[in-house]
Amino acid sequence: METPIGSTPVRESTLSAAAELSPKLHLAARRPPVRAWLQPTLIALVVVVAFITCYIGLQRDPQPHQVPLAVTGPDLPGEIRQALGDTVEVHPAANAEAARHALERHDVVATLSTDGPDQLRLETAGAVGTSTTSAVSNLVGTYAHGAGKHVTTEDVVPLTHFDTRGLAGFYMAFGVTLAGFVLGSNALGLASVLHLRHRLRLLSCASVAIGTVAAIIAGPMMGAVPAPLIPLVLTLILLAAAAAFTTKLLGTYLGPVGVPVATLVLLTVGNATSGAAIGADLLPAAARTISALLPPGAAVRTITDLSYFNGAHVAGPVITLALWSAVAAVLLTLHPRLIRRRAAATV
C-alpha cells in the first residue's frame, strides 16, 4: 500500500534531512577567520626554521673564540697570544702542575707547556667534548708547525668508556627536557579536572620521578654518565621541573601560542645551544650567553662538572635551574589572582 504524500513518515524524513543539512549550510554561510588558517601554519614554519637554523647553523662552521688555555713558561704565553689571537684566552700558569690543576677544575680546557728543545706538551680534557679538544689541538698544531716544534698530546680527563663521543649528557638532558615539556603540556588540559594546587603537586611529583629514573638509567645502569647519583638525580629533577613548570606557565598565560613558544625556548634554542653537540667555547658569543641562561645548557654544564670535574662549577647552573622552576611556579600560583583582579576591574 502506498503512503500518501502528506503522511507522517514523509514529513519526518524531510525534517531529518533538513536537520542534517542545517549545520552544513550554517558552516558554509560562516567563513572561517583567516587567523584559523594562518596561525597554525605560521607557528609550524617558525618552529621548523628555528630548529634547522639552530641545530645546523651552529654546527655548520663552529669557530673557537676565547677558548681558555693554560700556558706555562716565561715566553710561551706571549708567543701563543701573538700567534693565535683571540681564538684563545691565555691563562699563564706558574708550572705544569698548576696548569693541570686548572684543567682538572675545568677552569681551562687544555694546558700547553714546553717539553724539551723544540718540544711542546698539550694536555686536554676530552670530557669537555671532542669538538672543543679538536679545535684546541688544531690551533696548537698550527702554531707548532709555524714555529718548527713538535707537539705531544695527552688526554688527562678522558670520557668514560661508555660515552666515547661525549654526547650522553646532551641526550639525557634532551630526554628529561622533552619529558618535562610533555608533562607541562598535558597539565594544561587538566584545569577542569584538577585544582591548581593539585596540578602543581602533579608537576612536582612527576618531575621527581622523571629525574630519578633518568639518572638511574644513564648512571648506574648504563655507566654513560659517571656523576655521583644523588647530585645527578637532583640536577635532573630541577631540569624536569624547569621544563614542566615553564611549559605550563607559557600555556597558561599565552594560551594556544604558549606551547609552541615553550618548544622554541626549551627544545629548540635550549638544546641546540646547550654546549654538548658543539662545545660552548665554539658557539657565537650570543649563543654562549643564551646557553648558560636556559635550562638545557645549565643542566649539561652541571652534568659535565659532576661527572668529570668534581662539581667545581655547579653552583651557577644549579641556581639557574632552580630559578626557572621557582619563578614559573610562583607565577602560576599568582595567575588566578590576576584573573580575579581583571574581572573585578571590568565590572
Image (cartoon, rainbow, N blue to C red):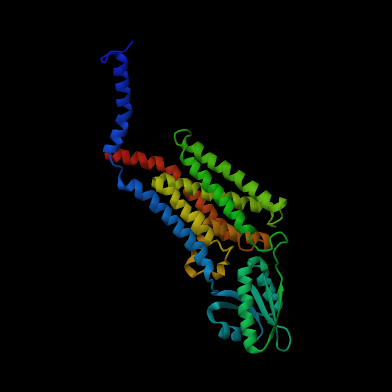
- Against 291, is 180 above or below? above
Return the x and y of residue 189 as percentages of the image width and height: 46, 38
Identify the residue at horizontal 54%, vertical 73% (top origin): 63
Q: Quadrant of the C terminus?
A: top left
Identify the residue at horizontal 31%, vertical 31% (top origin): 23
Is residue 293 shown to the viewer in this render? yes
- Against 5, is 252 above or below? below
Return the x and y of residue 216 as percentages of the image width and height: 68, 49
Return the x and y of residue 169 as percentages of the image width and height: 62, 58
Horizontally, is 27 left or right of 251 in the view? left
Return the x and y of residue 158 as percentages of the image width and height: 70, 67
Horizontally, is 301 left or right of 117 in the view? left
- Depth check: 200 or 224 in front? 224
Q: Quadrant of the N terminus?
A: top left
Identify the residue at horizontal 54%, vertical 39% (top origin): 202
Given the current orientation, which residue lies at the most extreme front position?
1
Quarter of image, res 310: bottom right
Q: How many marks are shown on the rendered structure?
A: 0
Quarter of image, res 271: bottom right
Is residue 288 shown to the viewer in this render? no
Given the current orientation, which residue lies at the most extreme top position?
1
Identify the residue at horizontal 63%, vertical 60% (top origin): 167
